[in-house]
Amino acid sequence: MMAIQGHLSLLLVVVPLIMAPIVAILPRARLAWFVALLVAVVCALLAGIQLWNIVNGGAISYELGGWAPPWGIEYRIDAVNAFVALIVAGITALTLPYALLSVEKEIPKQQIPFFYALFLLCLCGLLGITQTGDIFNVFVFLEISALASYGLISLGRHRQALTSAYQYLIMGTIGATFFLIGVGLIYSQTGTLNFADLAERLPAVFEHKTVHTGFAFIVIGVALKLALFPLHLWLPNAYTYAPTVVTIFLAATATKVAVYLMLRILFTIFPDNFVVNTPIFDLFIILGIAGILIASLYAIYQMDIKRLLAYSSVAQIGYMALGIGLASTAGVMATLLHLFNHALMKGALFMAVGAIIYRLGSCRMDNINGLGRVMPWTFGAVIIGGLSLVGIPGTAGFVSKWYLILAALEQQAWISVAVILVGSLLAVVYVGKIIEALYFKAALEANKSIKEAPLLLLLPTWTLALANIYFGLNTELTVGVATSAAQLLIGTIE
Amino acid sequence: MDFILGHYNYWVVILLMMVGFYIVISRGNLIKKIVGLNIFQASVFILYISLSTVENGTIPIFKEGFEVYSNPLPHVLILTAIVVGVATTALGLALVVRIKEAYGTIEEDEIHEQDHSL
C-alpha cells in the first residue's frame, strides 16, 4: 500500500494511458466498457486519496523517473490540482455507467472498443494536465487530450460531427501552437520549464518584451482551449454533434481543466504583480461580461437543446473568467467553486438530454412537447439541473453565483454584479423554454407512447442532480477546499 | 542592417508563421488549411531549434576538443512537438477523407451550403 501511496500522482496518468490500447483490442463492446469503467473508478479513488493526503499533509512533489527538478519532470500537486483532478476523475467515473446504453445506441458496435480507448486517452491527457508541474509536459498532455477529443467528437451520428471535429482540430491546434510559441519564448529567457523554477526566475526578466510576448501567446492559446468568448466558436458545434457521452464528458471536464491551467499560469507561473501590470484582468472581466450576455442571448434562440446548453456553457465560462478577472481570493474562490458546480449541473443536464436522445432519437425543441409527463424522472433531473443553472437558492449553482457576487461587491464592481444578475435572468428564459415545452405544451401524438429512460441512464443522472442539491445545501466541503485552493493561488500576488 | 541580418532566423520564423496562419484563415479547401497549419507549426519548430543553436557549438559530447555546446533540450522538445504535429496532420487528413465521403466535397463553402439547404 505504501508503495502505491508514493506514486499516486503518476498512477493517475499512467493507468488510463496503459489501459487505453488494451481496451482498444478487447473483442467485445461490453467488455471494453467494463474495463474502462474499472479504470475510471480506480482513477476516481486515486484522485480522492490524493486530495485527502494533500488536505491533511500538504503539497506533494513527485520526481518522474527519479530525476530531481528542475532538470527532470516534476509532478507537483497541491490543493488546487488535487481538487480539479478529483472533479475530472469523479465525473468520468459517473459518466461511464451512463455510457453503456447511450454508446450502444449511438455508435456502431465494432467501433465501441476504440471509442472507449479514445475516451481513456482523453482522460489521461486531462488528468496529466492537472498533475504536471512542467510547462512543456502541459503542452503534450493538452495535445493528447485534444487529439483524443477530436476523434471522439467525429464519432457522432450526423455528418456535421465530422466538420465540427475538423473545425475544433484547426482551432485547437492553433491554440496549442500558440501555447508552444509562448513556452519557447519564455524558455529562451529563463532556461527552465518547471513551474516553480519559472516563478523564481521570471521576475528577473519581467522587463523583457520577449516575456510579455510569450505571456500573451500562452494566454491566448489557453483561452482558445477553454472557449473564452469570443474564442468559443468551436464549442457549440462540437458539443451539439458529438455523441452524448462525449458531450457530457467534455462539458464537465475539458474546459474545467483549461480554466485550471489558466489559473496556474496567471497566479503561479507569473508571480509578483507581473500579471497585475498587464491589462489581462480587465480583459477577462470584459470578455467574461460579453460572454455571459451574448452567449446567454444566443442560447435563448436555439432550437436544439444540446446546442442551447452548449451556448449556456460558454456563458458559464464567462462567469469563471469574471471570477479570474476580479483577481482576488474571493474571485478565484468563486471561479473554482463554479468549476465544480458547473460540472455537476451541466453533467446532469446533458445526461438528461442524452436520455431524451436515447428514447426519441433527437432533442429538438419542437419534438419534446409534453414529454415531461411520460418521462417524469428524466425531466425531474432537467428541472433540478436547470434551477441550478439559473442559481435558485438550495442548488449548487446558487452557491457559486452567491460567492461570485460577493467577490464583485467586495471591489464595488457594480457592472459585474448587474451582469451576473442579468445572466441569471437570461438563464431563467432559456431554462424556462425547455420546461415550457416539456410540461405546458400539448403532447405530440407520437410522444405519448414513449417510455421512461432505462434505469442505467437515470441513476447517474439523478446522482448528479442530487449532488446539485446536496452541494447547494451543504457548502462546507466545497467552499472549504475552494477557499484553501484560492489562497494558495492568490497568495503570490497579495 | 545588423538588426535585420543578425536576426534573420527570426524573420524567417515570422514570415513562415504569418504565411501558415494566413492560409489557415483564408483558404476554404480543407486540405489547404491543413497544409497551412503545417507551415504554421514548422515555423515554431524552427523558432525552437534556432533559439538553442550556439555558433560553432556542437552536440553535447563529453570529450576533449568539444567545448562549445548547443542546448539540446529545445531540440528534444521539438522532436516531441513534431510527433504531435504528425499526429494532428494524420487525424486532420483522416477527417477530410471522411468529410469527402459524407459530403462529396472538401470545399468549406459547399459543405456549409449542404448543411443549410436541409
Image (cartoon, rainbow, N blue to C red):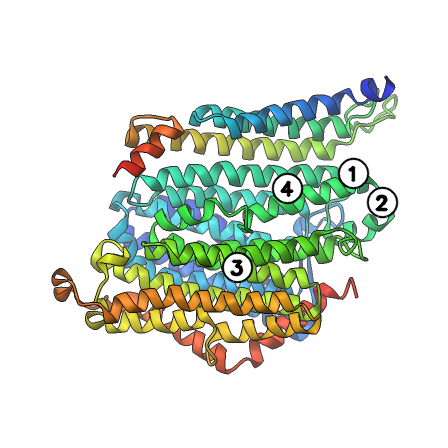
- Element assignment for label 3: helix
- In the rendered structure, find residue A179 and report the number of the disc placed on it: 4
Q: Which chain carries label 1?
A: A
Point out the tag, 3 or 1, that comes first from the N-terminus. 1
Quarter of the image holding residue A457? Answer: bottom left
How far separated are the C-alphas under marks 3 and 1? 33 Å
Task: Bin the neighbour count of mark 2 within 10 Å (Cα to Cα): few under 14, some 14-19, many 20 and up.
Answer: some
- In the rendered structure, find residue A292 and report the number of the disc placed on it: 3
Point out the tag, 3 or 4, that comes first from the N-terminus. 4
- In the rendered structure, find residue A210 and report the number of the disc placed on it: 1
Point out the tag, 4 or 2, that comes first from the N-terminus. 4
Q: Name the residue under label 2.
A: A205
Same-chain status of marks 3 and 2: yes
Residue A382 is situated, as x and y percent measured from the top left of the image, at: 34, 69
Which callout, 3 or 4, points to the residue nearer the camera? 3
Same-chain status of marks 1 and 4: yes
Residue type at numbered disc 3: Ile
Q: Are marks 1 and 2 in contact (CB under 8 Å)?
A: yes
Point out the tag, 1 or 2, that comes first from the N-terminus. 2
